[in-house]
Image (cartoon, rainbow, N blue to C red):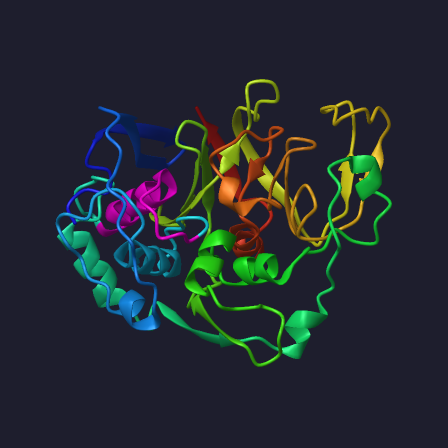
Amino acid sequence: MGKLLPKFLYVACIVMLNLPSQSFAIQTVAATVKNNSAPIEVQQVWTLESLNKANWAADLGRGQFPAYARAQVMLNNLHASPGAIDGKSGKNFLKALATYQQIQGFPLTGELTKQTWDSLIAKQSNSAFGVYVITEQDLKGPFAKSIPRNYALQAKMPGLYYTRMTEMLGEKFHIDEEFLRQLNPKAAFNNVGEKILVPNVRNELPHDVSLIIAHKGARQLYLFNGQNRLIASFPATIGGSETPSPKGTHKVVKVAANPYYGYSPKNFVQGANKKPLVLPSGPNGPVGNIWIALSKASFGIHGTPNPSLISKTASHGCIRLTNWDANDLGRKVQSGVVVKFLE
């Protein structure tokens, strides 16, 4: 498979950052459609064997394939996060490939080249997919029947919990909820001892996170170590036209797990809520289950209740990551780490 999006034109741009005693080069890949030809639909077989033995080919093109799913798991485990694993040739996958290529010093194409595939395979320590057995603890939750959209109603709930098992399992295994069901079409997801097919994913970043670049144009978060080397990236939702993210350089000041959310209409107005509210914690809260506070008041890096929308929508000025990527970062980032916003 030579090109992820064969009907797209790839444009690479170099962004130079000049900080005291530091110089970085981040290459980001953008794509524009050359024509509107629809991809050919191919019926895929999703089995443990087809996923773990999926191989590179030069002519896969756009679509959803076992090779893409396997590559996404490997990228996830090597700290080039594709966001929610879905087996598709989407832009978050493209950006993860570009990050991995830059880390390895490969030509930056945003394509799953043979060189990139071989490198991923060589670094793979475990099979990409495995079997998970649902436990009694999984079924205990806690779960909410539903999460109302209105913040005033959310504020009255005991917790903004998961609403279903597939949502919880999707976040546990970094997988798009629809894709999880696609891999397990006969699963009920509600029985102790039930076996399901899931990605084998990591939950640990390298320790030395010294600089974070929030690239608004790329909708991507880049992490550098103390030697100014790119070590990881996450797809991110960063600001919007009505509620833009801050500019310039700021610092991490605090990390809070399972945070309450303080809504203030001074920052933005949600629905008809004109008074401040305090929302309970939980993965379906507005900031997910981690809050990484920045030195710019009311701004931070946090999770989201909608992982499959990351980098595809706007935020209220903060940096949104999937809950698992935000948790991963929150476990390793220290107070004082520089966060630089780029356009």
Report if residue 176 is visible in the image. Answer: no
Secondary structure character of the magenta stretch overall: helix
Q: Quadrant of residue 197?
A: bottom left
Coordinates of residue 99 in the picture (x, y in percent): 31, 45
- Percent position (x, y) of residue 91? 35, 38
Task: Give residue 41's quadrant in the image.
Answer: top left
Residue sitting at the far top: 242
Residue 167: x, y in percent? 59, 56
Describe residue 106's horizontal placement relative to residue 218 as left or right: left
Side of 69 relative to 113 (left or right): right
The residue sitting at 63% across, 29% down in the picture is 316
| Quadrant the C terminus occupies | top left
Q: Does the magenta stretch include residue 95?
A: yes
Q: Which residue is drawn at 57% across and 75% down?
A: 134
| Relative horizontal placement of residue 260, taking residue 184 as reference (left or right) | right
The answer to whether any part of residue 287 appears in the image is yes
Q: How many marks?
A: 0
Q: What range is drawn magenta here?
A: 85-104
Does 16 appear above or below 40? above
162 drawn magenta: no
- Which one is in front, 41 or 224? 41
Pick whichever, 289 or 198, lies toward us: 198
Please name the residue shown 62% across and 63% down the image.
165
Residue that appears at 65% across and 48% down: 288
The residue lying furthest to the bottom in this view is 193
x%, y% of residue 224? 40, 46
> Is residue 316 positioned above or below 132 on the image?
above
